[in-house]
Each structure stands twice: as C-alpha cells, then as structure tokens.
Amino acid sequence: MRGKELLTEDQRTEFVRIPADMSESELETYYTFSQYDLEIIKRHRRDHNRLGFAVQLCVLRYPGWSLSDVGPIPDYIIEYIASQIDVNPNSFSLYAQREPTKHEHMEEIRQVYGYQNFSLGNYRKAAQFLLNHALQNGNSMY
C-alpha cells in the first residue's frame, strides 16, 4: 500500500527546478567557483566536458539534485558558469553525448567532494536527527 504523498506532482517538479530568474547575489552565492573547484574542473580536456562537469557540480550544490533530476538549466546559469571557466556556453549542448560521461563525472564529484548517495542508512540517520529536533521544539514551522 502506498503512503500518503506530501506534495503533488507539480509541487515536486517545482521543488527540483532551477528558478528561471535569480538575483545576481543568488547567482554568485550558489554558482561561483572556488580556486579548488577551478583546479578540479580544469582537469577535463574538452570544453563541453569542463562545462558539463562544472554545471553538474553547481546543480548538485543548488538546488541539491543531480543534473538528470533538475530538468532544463536556464541559459543565464550556463552563461555564468561558462564565463568562469572560459568556455563557450553553447558547448554545453555537446555534453554527455556518451551517457556514461555524466555518471563518471558524478562519481568523480562524489570522490573529490565527499558526497554520498542518500542510502537507507543515511535516511535513518537524518530521520533520527530531525525527530530529535522536532521533539525539542514545539514550533511546527521550525
């Protein structure tokens, strides 16, 4: 038996979507690379792979989903990311013509940055952590 769904399908889609418009401050906060990030990105040889890797890293950070989950990336975000790594934003259309490339890049991001898949064990840890917080706080909006 299927459990109760908290969000409608449209709400779930909106939850993972990158906004069509962000302020310059938001863009800088979420999508500006550190020197370390740039060193990792530059390891990739072709422009489209550098840009694809960089975009994948960015969307994993915000909104926190994989490239496959977020849907279309707004052009202004591709342009902002491309300008930081000196590549043509149009090269993004060539990214991951070979499907394993996205997966290989995601695995590299996991290894380099310490990301993990959200496993059952991680779910249990998060649920326990959140339950403890909820029990300590009577504010339902906290």
Image: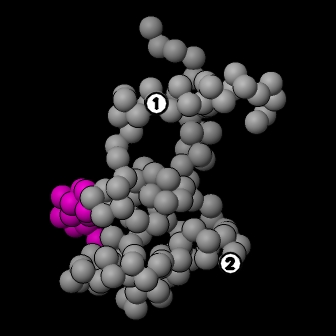
Magenta: main secondary structure: helix
Is residue 73 magenta-colored? no
- Left or right, residue 6 beside residue 99: right
- Residue 44: quarter of image: bottom left
- Left or right, residue 60 beside residue 49: right
- Residues under labels 1 and 2: Cα distance? 36 Å
The three-letter code of the residue at mark 2 reads Glu
Question: In the image, which disc is placed on residue 24?
Answer: 2
Question: In the image, which disc is placed on residue 125?
Answer: 1
Residue sitting at 37 percent across and 29 percent down? 121
What secondary structure is marked by label 1?
A: helix
The way the protein has been coloured in the rendering is one colour
Q: Residue furthest top?
A: 1
Quadrant of the snapshot with the N terminus = top left
How far across and how far down the image is residue 136, in percent?
72, 25
Residue sitting at 34 percent across and 43 percent down? 117
- Read off the magenta span: 92-108
Q: Given this view, does label 1 or label 2 mark the residue nearer the observer?
A: 1
Judging depth in this view, the residue of 93 and 52 nearest the camera is: 52
Judging depth in this view, the residue of 86 and 110 nearest the camera is: 110
